[in-house]
Image (spheres, grey):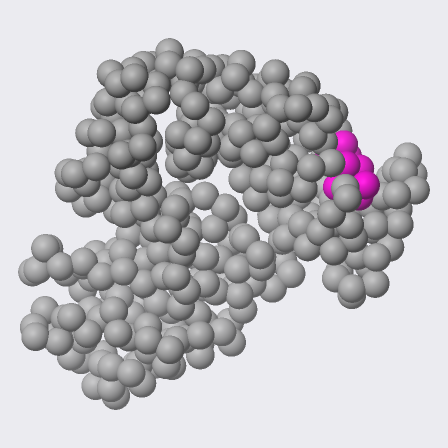
C-alpha cells in the first residue's frame, strides 16, 4: 500500500473508471489529469470555494457498468490553493483502514462482488465527506447521466416543453428542479439554446430564476447570453426591480462564452441602485468571479462591497474566499495597495488584515 498516495492511485488500483466534478462555484468536469496533478500538489485548485476543493467523484467498474458509486469530498486548501497534504493523507489512511489491510490486493474483487454495495459506506463518518444542496445534486445527477451516456430523467420533457415555448407561460408549477437541470445540461446537445433565447423574456420570475441557477453551470452562447442580458439590464437600473431576479441573471451568465456581455451586466448592477445589495455582491463573487479579473471591475466591486450594509463581516468573508482563487489573489492585493482607494475600502482592508489573513 506504500505506492498509494492519492485517491487517484487508490481507484486506479481497483480498476475503476473515474469522472470528477467540481461541486463548488459551479458543477463542472475536472479532467483526470488536472485532478491527479492537484492531488499530487503540482497545481493549485482552479475553482476553490470557501477554502476547499469541493468534489463529486463518480466511479464504476467495467465488469459491472450498471453499478455506479459517488463520493462527495471537500479537501481543505492552503492559502495558495494547494491541497493540504496532511488532510489528504489522513483521508487515505481512513479509507484503507475501513476496507481492511488487504485492500490493495482485494479491493477490485470486493468491488465487483457482493461487497460492491459497501462502497458508499466508506464515506460514513469521514470528515471530508459532505452533502451538496438539492440544486447541486440535481445538476450533478444530470451531468453524470450525460457523461455515462444515459438518458435524462423522466422530468426532462416537461422542462423542455415549457422553456422552449410549447406551454403557456403560467403552466410551470409541475416542473421540478431535476427536469430543469436535465434540460440545461443537454441544452446544446438537443439544440434548445435558440428556442430558449427566443422565449426567455416572457417567463415569470420564479421559473426564470430556477432556470438561471442551473444555467450557471453551462457555457452559454452569445445569443442566449444576449437574451438574458436584455431581460436583466432594466432590473439593474430600477430601484424597484427584483434584486433576486437580477442576481439569478448574473448567475446564469457566470460561465458565458460572451464575457463582455457578462461584464456589462455586472458593471450595470454595481453602478445601479442594487450595487450594495449583498445578494448581488455574493453572487458575483461566487458564480461570476472570473469577471473580476478585470482590474477596473474588481476595484468597483471592492468599493461597493466595502460600503455594503452587510458590514465588515461580509467583506472579510467574501474577500478571503476570493483571495484563494488563482489569478485573483495578486489582483486583489494590488487593489489593497491602490492609493486611489476610498477611505471606506481602506478601513475594510484594515479589518481584513487584522484577521491575520496573508
Q: How many marks?
A: 0
Q: Is residue 225 visible?
A: yes
336 to the left or right of 114: right
In terms of secondary structure, what is the magenta stretch mainly? Answer: helix
Identity of the residue drawn at 30% across and 17% down: 168
Quadrant in the rendering for residue 114: bottom left
Residue 309 in the image: above or below residue 132: above
Measured as percent of width and height from the top left, residue 295 is found at: 73, 32
Q: Is residue 65 left or right of residue 153?
A: left
Compared to residue 29, the image places residue 61 above or below, namely below
- Quadrant that contains the C terminus: bottom right
x, y (%) of residue 134? Answer: 37, 51
- Where residue 338 appears, as percent x and y from the top left, is 87, 39
Residue 169 lies within the magenta run? no
Q: Which quarter shows the N terminus?
A: bottom left
Report which quarter residue 143 is drawn in.
top left
Task: Name the one closer to the observer, 83 or 220.
Answer: 220
Front one among 227 and 119: 227
Please tell me which residue is depicted at 7% across the width and 73% down the height of the picture.
Answer: 113
For the magenta stretch, what is the residue range?
299-307
Asked whether 305 falls inside the magenta stretch, the response is yes
Amino acid at each position: 500500500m506504500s505506492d498509494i498516495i492519492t485517491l487517484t492511485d487508490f481507484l486506479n488500483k481497483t480498476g475503476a473508471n473515474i469522472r470528477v466534478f467540481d461541486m463548488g462555484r459551479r458543477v463542472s468536469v475536472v479532467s483526470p489529469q488536472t485532478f491527479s496533478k492537484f492531488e499530487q500538489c503540482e497545481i493549485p485548485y482552479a475553482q476553490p470555494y470557501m477554502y476547499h476543493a469541493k468534489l463529486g467523484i463518480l466511479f464504476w467498474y467495467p465488469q459491472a457498468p450498471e453499478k455506479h458509486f459517488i463520493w462527495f469530498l471537500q479537501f481543505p486548501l492552503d492559502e495558495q490553493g494547494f491541497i493540504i497534504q496532511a488532510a489528504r493523507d489522513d483521508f487515505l489512511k481512513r479509507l484503507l483502514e475501513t476496507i481492511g489491510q488487504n485492500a490493495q490486493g482485494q479491493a477490485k474483487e470486493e468491488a465487483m462482488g457482493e461487497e460492491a454495495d459497501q462502497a458508499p459506506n466508506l464515506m460514513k463518518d469521514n470528515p471530508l465527506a459532505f452533502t451538496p444542496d438539492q440544486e447541486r445534486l440535481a445538476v450533478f445527477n444530470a451531468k453524470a447521466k450525460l457523461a455515462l451516456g444515459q438518458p435524462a430523467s423522466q422530468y426532462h420533457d416537461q422542462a423542455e416543453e415549457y422553456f422552449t415555448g410549447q406551454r403557456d407561460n403560467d403552466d410551470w408549477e409541475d416542473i421540478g428542479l431535476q427536469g430543469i437541470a436535465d434540460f440545461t445540461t443537454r441544452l446544446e446537445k438537443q439544440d434548445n439554446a435558440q428556442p430558449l433565447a427566443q422565449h426567455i423574456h416572457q417567463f415569470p420570475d420564479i421559473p426564470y430564476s430556477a432556470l438561471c441557477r442551473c444555467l450557471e453551470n453551462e457555457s452559454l452562447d452569445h445569443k442566449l447570453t444576449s437574451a438574458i442580458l436584455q431581460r436583466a439590464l432594466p432590473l439593474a437600473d430600477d430601484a424597484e426591480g427584483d434584486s433576486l431576479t437580477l442576481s439569478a441573471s448574473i448567475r446564469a451568465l457566470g460561465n458565458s462564452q460572451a464575457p463582455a456581455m457578462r461584464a456589462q451586466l455586472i458593471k450595470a448592477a454595481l453602478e445601479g441602485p442594487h450595487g450594495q445589495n449583498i445578494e448581488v455582491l455574493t453572487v458575483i463573487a461566487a458564480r461570476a468571479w472570473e469577471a473580476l479579473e478585470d482590474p477596473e471591475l474588481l476595484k468597483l466591486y471592492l468599493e461597493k462591497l466595502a460600503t455594503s450594509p452587510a458590514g465588515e463581516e461580509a467583506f472579510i468573508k467574501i474577500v478571503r474566499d476570493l483571495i484563494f482563487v488563482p489569478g485573483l489573489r495578486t489582483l486583489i492585493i494590488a487593489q489593497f495597495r491602490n492609493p486611489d482607494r476610498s477611505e471606506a475600502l481602506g478601513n475594510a482592508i484594515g479589518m481584513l488584515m487584522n484577521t491575520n489573513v496573508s
